[in-house]
Image (spheres, rainbow, N blue to C red):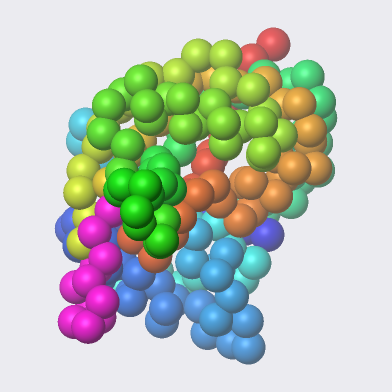
Amino acid sequence: MYMTRVILKNVPQPETIHSLLLAAFPGENSDKTHERLWRVDKLEEHTELLVVSINTPELQHIAQEDARNKTLNYTPLLARLANGQEWNFRLCANPVEHKKKNTSDKRVKVYALRSAAEQLEWLNKQSSKHGFHVKECAVLHEEWRTNTNDKTNTTRILAVTFEGCLAITDAEAFREALIHGIGGGKTLGCGLLSVAREIP
């Protein structure tokens, strides 16, 4: 496994980044979903693209020439994760609920969770499935994203960026979350959970 971070030349639309990433993974495994697990972080001075993949991506076509661009072997970090460890984290996700609009509906519909309280409650529910407990968390940013590449089935989702600290409760489940992501909306840059600076 690899984690790649590059400084973007510009900030393409999410559906454009997804298309660009399809060409960034040559080889027989290029169709695997987790090769395209990615997130854009808009920082004060620049915008970064973070990608988790089983192959090394070729991102020169969208990256600035910058010493901070790097691809690291993700496996050593994954291997040293253990129950009880506390880490700072960031996650861009698509918090939703599935429910019927009214009692007469036969089909369940998907609704975006709009308030910060609902979004944080969603994250807490997800954390129990994915091997961690949220100790502190804030919603940093949210934006609507639309996939217009498929004209017959336009997708619009709410992308919410969370940041805080967590404690690992099930190391194996947590590794799976780091590799495969959390929630839906992955083609539009949601789902990538990253950790940094283990808390002593």
Q: What residue appears at the point 35 percent right and 57 percent down from the top-left corner?
A: 105
Q: What residue appears at the point 67 percent right and 38 percent down from the top-left corner?
A: 129
Q: Is residue 160 magenta?
A: no
Instruction: Indicate the quadrant where residue 139 lies.
Output: top left
In the displayed structure, 153 sits above or below 12; it is: below
Q: Is residue 1 left or right of residue 126?
A: right
Which residue is outermost to the front?
Answer: 104
Residue 131 x %, y %: 71, 34
Q: Which range is magenta?
A: 147-157
Q: Is residue 50 visible?
A: no
In the displayed structure, 71 sits above or below 197; it is: below
Q: Is residue 14 left or right of residue 98?
A: left
Nearest the camera: 46 or 90?
90
Q: Is residue 139 visible?
A: yes
Residue 191 x %, y %: 47, 49
Instruction: Indicate the quadrant where residue 180 lies.
Output: bottom right
Q: How many callouts does the rendering have?
A: 0
Q: Is residue 166 left or right of residue 45?
A: right
Magenta stretch: dominant secondary structure: loop
Q: What residue appears at the point 54 percent right and 39 percent down from the top-left corner?
A: 194
Q: What residue appears at the point 64 percent right and 46 percent down from the top-left corner?
A: 177
Residue 11 x %, y %: 19, 56
Residue 3 x %, y %: 56, 53
Q: Which quarter of the rendering shows the C terminus?
A: top right
Q: Is residue 148 magenta?
A: yes
